[in-house]
Amino acid sequence: MAEPFWTKIEAGIAEVVIESPPVNALDSVGWISLARTIDALNADPEVRVLIIRAEGRGFCAGVDIKELQKHPERVSQVNGGNWETFRAIHRGKKPVIVAAHGYIIGGGIGICGSADIILCSPCATFSVPEVDRGALGAGAHLQRLFPVQKVRQMYFTGEPIDAAEAYRLGAVEKIVAKEELRAEALALATTIAAKSHIMIRLAKEALNGIEDGDLEHKYRWEQGFTAQAYLTADSQEARDAFTDKRAAKFSGASQTSSQ
């Protein structure tokens, strides 16, 4: 089976390009493979900077809900792949620039929230519909992007925010026309790649060390609740409704939309 992404290295810049139609959602194997690829690029002495971008309708729709619907026992494998991918981006020694367009959902939020710099197109939207999918996660990474109360509003409602709002809140470095997004990311990466790789590596490690709290530990905490959620009937109903393209019906509660 083909990888849901491909890579290219040129002039010290590694591009990791997600391309997994129709929505750039990755299954359990895909997430684990992505983590290993990013680890390998971080270990490659020829690579100075990483760019993560995507082809298709949107940046990344997160995990493959249909896989988990068929194989709920794989939730721990998916969680592990997510955790390792985000850890590789955040804790890796090389700066990571995300160039995102279209929808940025769930695991896509995790990638952005783990990265060092985010560029996006005007059509980009950030959302965490986890509650409507019977799952949890990505809150730690969302909180690395946006203020606490905005995170909770997004998490409880599942409503997206657009590129302009993300820029206003300080998560996005620059909004760039979609057709210019890759070129802008390459220009920024070229500037960073020209600097001392030793100093940049030390700078990233130092900056990680002064962040508030341990991102990986906070995400692991969330994942425990994801596993707990998957044991409930409401989680199963949310996933059933999503795959069946219908409104979810929870016991003892009013009908809830599963978008």
Image (tube, rainbow, N blue to C red):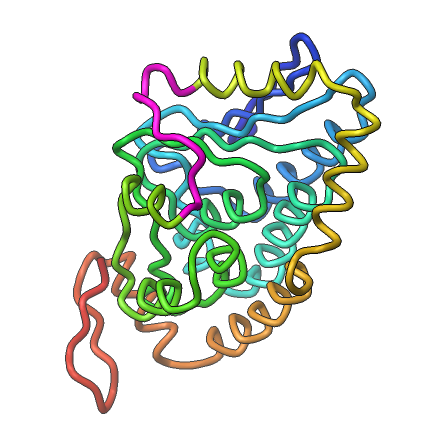
Residue 133 vs residue 78: left or right? left
At horizontal 46% and vertical 56% (from top left) the residue drawn is: 142
Residue 90 at x, y percent in the picture = 66, 45
Residue 230 at x, y percent in the picture = 47, 73
In this view, the residue in front, 174 or 245, is 174
Q: Is residue 2 visible?
A: no
At horizontal 48% and vertical 35% (from top left) the residue drawn is: 118
Residue 113 vs residue 153: left or right? right
In this view, the residue in front, 17 or 66, is 17
Residue 166 vs residue 137: left or right? left
At horizontal 23% and vertical 91% (from top left) the residue drawn is: 252
At horizontal 35% and vertical 30% (from top left) the residue drawn is: 175
Q: Which residue lies furthest to the top in this view?
A: 11
Task: Indicate the quadrant containing the N terminus: top left, top right, bottom left or bottom right.
Answer: top right
Q: Is residue 100 above or below residue 179?
A: below
Residue 241 vs residue 36: left or right? left
In this view, the residue in front, 146 or 241, is 146
In this view, the residue in front, 149 or 250, is 149
Magenta region: which residues?
Answer: 170-181
Quarter occupied by residue 6:
top right
Residue 250 at x, y percent in the picture = 25, 81
Quarter occupied by residue 218:
bottom right
Residue 68 is a magenta residue: no
Q: Is residue 77 above or below residue 61?
A: below
